[in-house]
Amino acid sequence: MKTLSFLAATLALSFCATAMAHGPSEKITVLQEQLLKNAPGKKAMMIEVDYKPGQSSIAHKHEGTAMAYVLEGEVTSQVKGEQAITYKKGQFWYEPAGSEHLVSKNASQSQPAKLLVFMVLAPDEEVLIPLEN
């Protein structure tokens, strides 16, 4: 269990370091990470994403499948090939593995926003890969 906690903390720190290398970004907290016994070679992650007013993520892609649920505020999201959609508290969306997430931002300039993200990916896959442009 200590190893799993260490890995989660390391992942969270590297995830935040990657985001910070590209300027002020969202706060990312790994809430849970677990290997899946019923899906060998896969793990599930539960991540909380906190946006300050007007804050956004860098354009990125996920190697794993992601499902996001808005806990607080409003978040605008756009996956390549689709229209940008603003989701309100209680709404959710799905991103297939490999999706290019072009826009992920707090829709408000005055209120914070928070997401709960559930991901399924291989243990060696990256949670977030910054896009070049």
Image (cartoon, grey):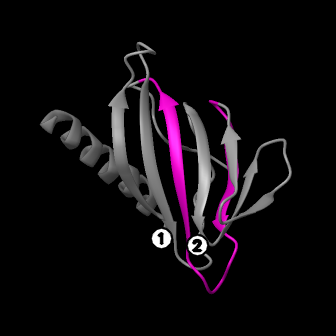
**Which quadrant: the N terminus?**
top left
Q: Tag 1: Cα neighbours inside 10 Å, few (<14), some, or many (≥20)?
A: few
Q: Residue furthest left?
A: 2
| Quadrant hosting residue 77 | bottom right
- Residue 109 part of the magenta segment: yes
Q: Are marks 2 and 1 in contact (CB under 8 Å)?
A: yes
- Residue 113 part of the magenta segment: yes
Instruction: Identify the magenta region.
Output: 97-122
Give residue 24's mark.
1
Decide which of 77, 37 is in the foreground and name it.
37
The residue type indicated by label 1 comes to Pro
Residue at screen point 68% across, 79% down: 108
Q: What x and y, as percent, mark residue 90?
A: 66, 60
Looking at the image, residue 74 sits to the left or right of residue 81; the answer is left
Q: From this viewpoint, is residue 61 visible?
A: no
The residue type indicated by label 2 comes to Gln
Looking at the image, residue 3 sits to the left or right of residue 71; the answer is left
Q: Residue furthest bottom?
A: 110
